[in-house]
Amino acid sequence: MRAPTNGPDVAAGDVLLAVENVSLSFGGVRAVSDVSFDIRKGEIRAIIGPNGAGKTSMLNVINGFYHPQEGRITFKGQTRPKMRPYEAADGGIARTFQNVALFRGMTALDNIMAGRSLKMNKSFFWQLLRYGPAMQEEVEHRARVEEIIDFLKIQEIRRIPVGRLPYGLQKRVELGRALAMEPELLLLDEPMAGMNLEEKEDMSRFILDVNDHYGTTIALIEHDMGVVMDLSDRVVVLDHGEKIADGTPDEIKSNQAVIDAYLGVAH
């Protein structure tokens, strides 16, 4: 399974998504203020900052949940004003959430299958009958899902309702559901939140494997700075809705503005 090819092709290392002078306000509160950065195809791009910096609001702008009052988002060379989340998903953008957003009464397998819904072409009538062309289509999509289950090493929990799973495995199932959409750009909102050290190590390995094996470009929000520095190719730093730094992990670690705002004031 590889990333989709909807829209113009983007070569590895070229700009896949550009955020240009984006501002977002809620009433009198400005969540994002004149922020610009880009995400290059094939990279792992981290977005960091203290609580309230505007990180999740920025992801919500990228996948169409929020519409900025100023600026624009360009994806694969196409500017998409007021893009809806389903349009972002159909165009090749998938995401996970800070708080796990799964169907708790459904099995891990069925949750990941839900990620294939945009790929299914047969009508609801055929899917309801589960006969003929619809059955063949379901078999094909099921095979893709089984590949993802094997990739994430969750074979043993595939038939268990996700509400009964430990938190770390729920996060892995949510990642699987996003991968089932075959995204070109995967947005991960604090994928390590609430995990112990072993679970973080597992998730870090899977993020690297997704990037390498599937060729998926990843934008990552994460508070664990060790994870950010180990995984990321480039890092953009927000503080109070404004961009204060942008560069490689080594450049970010030595940036005094970042040290003061996020890592703690140096003495």
Image (tube, rainbow, N blue to C red):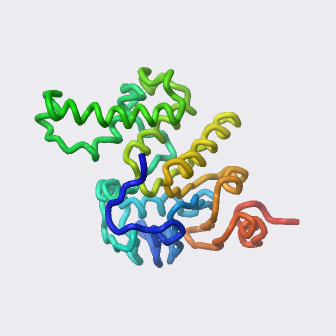
Specify the farthest residue to the right.
267
Residue 247: give x, y in percent of width and height: 66, 71
Task: Name the residue rendered at 35%, 74% in the picture.
Answer: 79
Q: Quadrant of residue 140?
A: top left
Task: Name the residue rendered at 33%, 37% in the picture.
Answer: 114
Left or right, 163 with reference to 134: right
Residue 29: tell me if it is visible.
no
Check the image and report above or below for 265 versus 208: below
Check the image and report above or below for 141 versus 69: above
Left or right, 100 with reference to 88: right
Quadrant holding the C terminus: bottom right
Specify the farthest residue to the left.
125
Q: Nearer the viewer, residue 136 or 62?
A: 136
Q: Quadrant of residue 10?
A: bottom left
Check the image and report above or below for 26 versus 159: below
Say how many tags the image has.
Answer: 0
Left or right, 37 with reference to 24: right
Task: Name the residue rendered at 56%, 48% in the picture.
Answer: 190
Residue 39: give x, y in percent of width and height: 52, 67
Residue 168: give x, y in percent of width and height: 57, 33
Q: Nearer the viewer, residue 52 or 75?
A: 75
Check the image and report above or below for 62 versus 203: below
Quadrant holding the N terminus: top left
Task: Name the residue rendered at 50%, 69% in the picture.
Answer: 32
Residue 84: give x, y in percent of width and height: 30, 60
Residue 167: tell me if it is visible.
yes
